[in-house]
Amino acid sequence: MDKFRSGFVAIVGRPNTGKSTLLNALVGEKVAITSTRPQTTRRAIRGIVHRPEGQVILVDTPGIHKPKTLLGQRLNALVAETYADVDLIICCLPSDEEIGPGDKRIISEISGSIPLIAVVTKSDRVVPATLMEKLSLVGTLAPWKEIIPVSAKKDYQIEKLLSLLISHLPEGPALYPEDYVSEESELDTYSELIREAALELLSDELPHSLMVTIEEVAVGEDGKTPVIYGKIFLERDSQKKILLGKSGERIKEIGIKARQSIEKYRGEKVFLKLHVGVESEWQRNPRALEKFGF
């Protein structure tokens, strides 16, 4: 009988290459927010997968990019720190996008002593002939242990990828109890679900400026329903109009969407109260970044 295997697997790639979507598909439930906006992921988020033959601790990382702010520099440093301390690295390369300088830079940075697996994501978006060409091209970029196309949306080859990951991990005991699927705290999850709702409903220029904190979780007047107080921080007063919308309609819509996601996560009704604040140029301010945990 094969021995039990366990270890850490970093998921890296450019922004919007399907890293968080892949993490959620492998875990089998939502542990990371997703969006088409760059820099959606701002922390190393761990998702834990349990199988009879092994345990995989997946670490979703921020997309590696050319930083324009202090926050961007710290996110890139977080990624480098993460993949320096794992057993295996997944590099996500979308099937429907050209291999660019950013991809090649990332592959160069991660190439070394840690085994690499190339995951060609979003394989459902291209025809088979195009996918085969992409797989051949990817094969020339690094000494991969495996190259596998997947589609998280279609659940294509997700289980096969998981088996491959386990096969390349070292022998060892489970590192987390079986009922753990993520290390995220409840408060972090609430703030991320609020930010996800805002990312979906706001225009392109604003999402980078958003930061969400949870100020308090209390009990409602009925004595049982949780009341979550969240605060959305912007970088400038002028951005408030965009966030609030006409007569406050947009912030209301964000609140409804976020509340529904939190209720799904908790499995019960909640009240959500959102407030808006300004932390001037917080992405470039060391003190503000420390305040927000970066």
Image: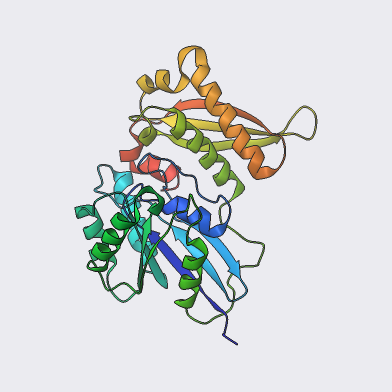
* Total tally of numbered discs in the picture: 0
Q: Nearer the viewer, residue 84 or 64?
A: 64
Residue under the image location 56 percent in, 45 percent down: 189
Viewer-nearest residue: 99 or 181: 99
The image's colour scheme reads: rainbow
Look at the picture and state if 14 lies above or below 59. Answer: above
Residue under the image location 75 percent in, 34 percent down: 225
Q: Horizontal and vertical percent for residue 119?
A: 37, 62
Q: Residue furthest right?
A: 223
Q: Above or below — where is 280 with respect to 138?
A: above
In this rendering, position of residue 9 left or right of residue 113: right
Q: Quadrant of residue 137?
A: bottom left
In front of the other: 255 or 143: 143
At a point 60% along the width and 38% down the height, the residue shown is 261
Left or right, residue 11 beside residue 275: left
Residue 270 located left or right of residue 81? right
- Decide: is 109 above or below 290: below
**The furthest residue to the bottom:** 1
> In the rendered image, which quarter contains the N terminus?
bottom right
What residue is rendered at 49% in x and 67% in y? 160
Residue farthest toward the left in the current orientation of the protein: 101
Q: Picture coordinates of residue 254 (x, y %)?
A: 53, 28
On the image, the x and y values in percent for residue 149 come to 39, 61
